[in-house]
Image: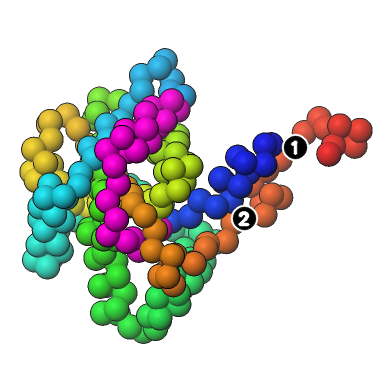
Amino acid sequence: MRPEFQQLIENRRSIRAYTSARVDLAVVQRICTAARRAPSGANLQPGTFHVLTGQPLVDLTADLTLAVDQKRPLDSEYSYFPDPMPAELKDRQRKAGYALYQALGIARRDVAGRREQFARNYAFFGAPVGVVVTIDRRMGKGCFMDLGMSIMSFLLAAEAEQLGATGIGALANYGTVVHQSLELPAEEMVVCGIALGHPDLQAAVNGFRTERAGLDEYTSFRGFTQENAT
């Protein structure tokens, strides 16, 4: 693996605090172009990136915040997590959550603090650019995998541009609100959001890193010999 690519992979993290510095349109266009280079079955290239900044982003954030404040029912069109959550995955989820809130200085029993932090998902964590990612409802389940590769390409391209980003799965919780706010075509399903901008390097939350499973936990190697092991 080339050192520069390994560095890119290792440096990438979910950024949840941003400076107010704007991001040039040309930069965002390069990132979106890189995202589209991801592979897809039959070259269908599923997914659309609706990129917002300035007043359009303010308006969407306001609509989402109102939905949260009014405690509107969640209306995500797809299941993100397994239900029920297996114990080993629940443990992983809890550890990630505890580490995040610890970085933010939010106590485990501070329900209001946790709720307030989660609500920042719907404000794109204060990023100057917000992206709404959608997919055509007529696409098959495999196309979600293709879209995921496109999103990962987007995140790596953002890192290569020395920007920060994070996916926002929670955005799909209010898909109807997003649809109405952006006047999206009827066939588009809201999949997630992405926050994009210059990371606030002074924010403690941006120093938070989740743990990754060890190689032996998620791989199986067959047919290799000691001679071709490196």
Q: In the figure, is residue 65 to the left or right of 36?
A: left
The secondary structure type at the circle numbered 2 is loop
The amino acid pointed to by label 1 is: Phe
Q: Tell me residue 193's x, y (percent).
A: 29, 47
Q: Is residue 90 visible?
A: no
Q: Calculate the distance from the C-alpha at mark 1 to the C-alpha at mark 2.
A: 16 Å
In the image, what residue type sits under mark 2? Ala
Q: State how many labels appear.
A: 2
Residue under circle 1?
221
Give the quarter of the figure containing the N terminus: top right
Q: Is residue 204 left or right of residue 227?
A: left
In depth, the one of 146 and 19 nearer the eye is 19
User: Magenta includes 27?
Assistant: yes
Residue 35, placed above or below residue 55: above
In this rendering, the answer to whether 85 lies above or below 149 is below
Q: Residue at 51% across / 51% down in the picture?
A: 12
What is the span of residues highlighted in magenta in the rendered image?
Answer: 15-38
> Which element type, helix, strand or loop, lies under badge 1?
loop
Q: Is residue 147 above or below residue 178?
A: above
Residue under label 2, please give it: 213
